């Protein structure tokens, strides 16, 4: 298995799923706060229900802002790990 495959396995490991379930409400709130629709306007114009129903995805710019504001980079991630994480979690542009 290459490094990318190992990272995917780690993201979907039982421990990772348990953490996601334990913090699901907080993760939904964080996603809602940083989704580009709300971030660009400066207030919540869509809520989690809207995001689910319309299948709104987070764009890379918003994800990177989330990481910067919450101090997730660069001191916790090196740029290569961040690149791999973005590729695995965000949909492609096309």
Image (cartoon, helix red, strand yellow):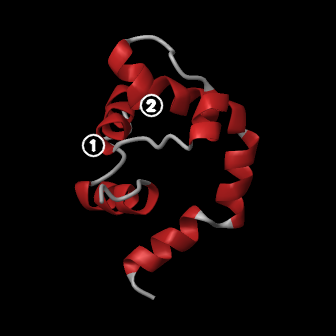
Q: Does 56 sit above or below residue 68?
A: below
The residue at the point 61 percent across, 30 percent down is: 50
Q: Give percent across and percent down for residue 58.
A: 43, 41
Left or right: where 3 falls relative to 51: left
Viewer-side residue, 47 vs 81: 47
Quadrant showing the N terminus: bottom left
The image's mark for residue 74 is 1
- Residue that extends furthest to the bottom in the rendered view of this protein: 1
The residue at the point 33 percent across, 60 percent down is: 81
The residue at the point 39 percent across, 78 percent down is: 3
Q: Which of the 4 quarters of the picture holds residue 88?
A: bottom left
Left or right: where 5 falls relative to 55: left
Residue 11 seen in the figure: yes
Left or right: where 52 falls relative to 57: right
Q: Give percent across and percent down for residue 72.
A: 38, 39
**What element does badge 2 sit on?**
loop
- Residue that extends furthest to the left in the rendered view of this protein: 79
Left or right: where 18 falls relative to 66: right
Viewer-side residue, 40 vs 14: 40
**How many neighbours does mark 2 have within 10 angstroms: few (below 14), some (14-19), or many (20 or more)?**
many
Q: Which residue is mark 2?
A: 35
Q: Earlier in the sequence, mark 2 or mark 1?
A: 2
Q: Give percent across and percent down for residue 31.
A: 53, 33
């Amino acid at each position: 298995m290459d490094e990318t495959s190992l990272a995917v396995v780690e993201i979907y490991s039982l421990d990772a799923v348990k953490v996601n379930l334990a913090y699901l409400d907080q993760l939904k709130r964080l996603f809602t706060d940083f989704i580009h629709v709300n971030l660009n306007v400066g207030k919540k114009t869509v809520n989690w229900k809207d995001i689910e129903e319309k299948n709104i995805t987070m764009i890379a710019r918003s994800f990177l802002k989330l990481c910067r504001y919450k101090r997730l980079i660069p001191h916790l991630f090196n740029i290569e790990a961040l690149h791999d994480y973005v590729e695995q979690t965000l949909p492609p542009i096309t």
